[in-house]
Image (cartoon, rainbow, N blue to C red):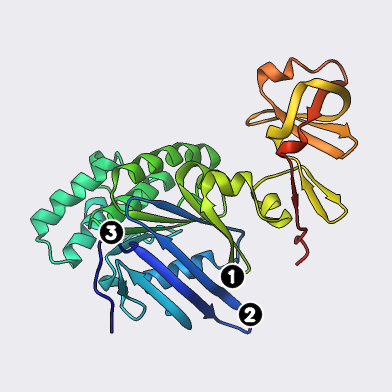
Amino acid sequence: MQPVTNAASPLLELQSVWKSYTAAPAVQDVSLTLRSGETLALLGPSGCGKSTLLRLIAGLERPDAGRVCMAGQDVTLSPPERRNLSMVFQDYALFPHLNVAENVAYGPRMRGVSRQAAGVTALEALARVGLEELHARRIHELSGGQQQRVALARALAPGPALLLLDEPLSNLDEQLRTSLRRDLGRLFAETRAGVLLVTHDQREALSLAGRVALMRAGKVVQAGETGAVFSRPVSAWAAAFLGERNLFPQQGGVLMVPERAVVLGQGEAWPVLQSVPSEDGTRVRLAHPLGPLSVTLSPREAALLSGPSLQARVNMAECLTLPDDRDV
């Protein structure tokens, strides 16, 4: 018997979901919740099960075990069109035989909206992504960034309760990704939908998601508010994947020295082993007793460099000792 829809129920709830294609499960015992208006990032390396999990949620695959619920209703066996969701695929999956406006109007038309009303909805959705002037263009006439915006508009046009995005920026160059991250953040804030974002890019998760579920080998190894996950990873593997550079083997585990724990302009002057420009400033490696210590300097902090050394101390209260699971 299906549960009665309850406004207090999560928009999306996964209950111990499993999926296998071979002997090794692609998704292992995953349980997650997502509420309306919330953005959750499924973050992890390629092949960890993120996209498989997204396809299970979308109804494009069926789990071997577990349940997928939306607004308190079990939709595990329901087809995609019965789930009140839209999906933006990694390759955008636009229809080449339709123009921009026709692509965006497709979803409303499939839900029974008249051609005229669907056309109005399509133009409104295109305006949200800044492409209303290109409504008559053919898909092959668009740049990669424009195609990505059309795919977003098409997903938004039906007004779904849940928006699924599978690596939406992975096919774009770095400059365009940075620009579109800002646009995605604005769109997510404007919509009342729940948003589930699959990404391998830590910057996308940090800038777009209020919560993160970190996946490895089909399992969610850590989940929580984005800031908490990034600042307090549960293991050395999680820390390394999330971008921590200062991981030093210790008896009983690994010492993580986050960059916020490195206090500049105090303590001893340590020899600079390397100094290279980075997108955030100047990245230096210091010859520290713990090991080669990496820290990124802003232009103002770079002025503290005195010849071949940099004065710094490590605030041990900000450091974490983590289990070393990197070879598991």
Discs 1, 2 touching: Cβ within 8 Å? yes
Identify the amino acid type marked 3.
Answer: Ala
Identify the amino acid type marked 1.
Answer: Gly
Q: Residue at x 27, y 65 (%)?
A: 84
Q: Residues within 10 Å of mark 3 (few under 14, many from 20)?
A: many
Residue 212 can be seen in this image: yes
| Residue matched to label 3 | 161
Mark 1–mark 3 Cα distance, whole angstroms, equals: 26 Å
Q: Nearer the viewer, residue 138 or 79?
A: 79
| Residue matched to label 2 | 24
Comes first in the chain, label 1 or label 2: 2
Q: Residue 131, how many percent across, how many down?
A: 28, 41
Left or right: where 301 falls relative to 195: right
Mark 1–mark 2 Cα distance, whole angstroms, equals: 9 Å
> Which quadrant, please, contains the C terminus?
bottom right
Q: Residues within 10 Å of mark 2 (few under 14, many from 20)?
A: few
Residue 63 can be seen in this image: no
> Which quadrant, please, contains the N terminus?
bottom left
Discs 3, 2 touching: Cβ within 8 Å? no
Mark 3–mark 2 Cα distance, whole angstroms, equals: 33 Å
Q: Residue at x 56, y 46 (%)?
A: 228
Q: Which mark is residue 218?
A: 1
Left or right: where 35 falls relative to 258: left
Q: Secondary structure at mark 3?
A: loop
Q: 319 above or below 19? A: above
Left or right: where 260 falls relative to 185: right
Q: 173 above or below 88? A: above
Identify the amino acid type marked 2.
Answer: Ala
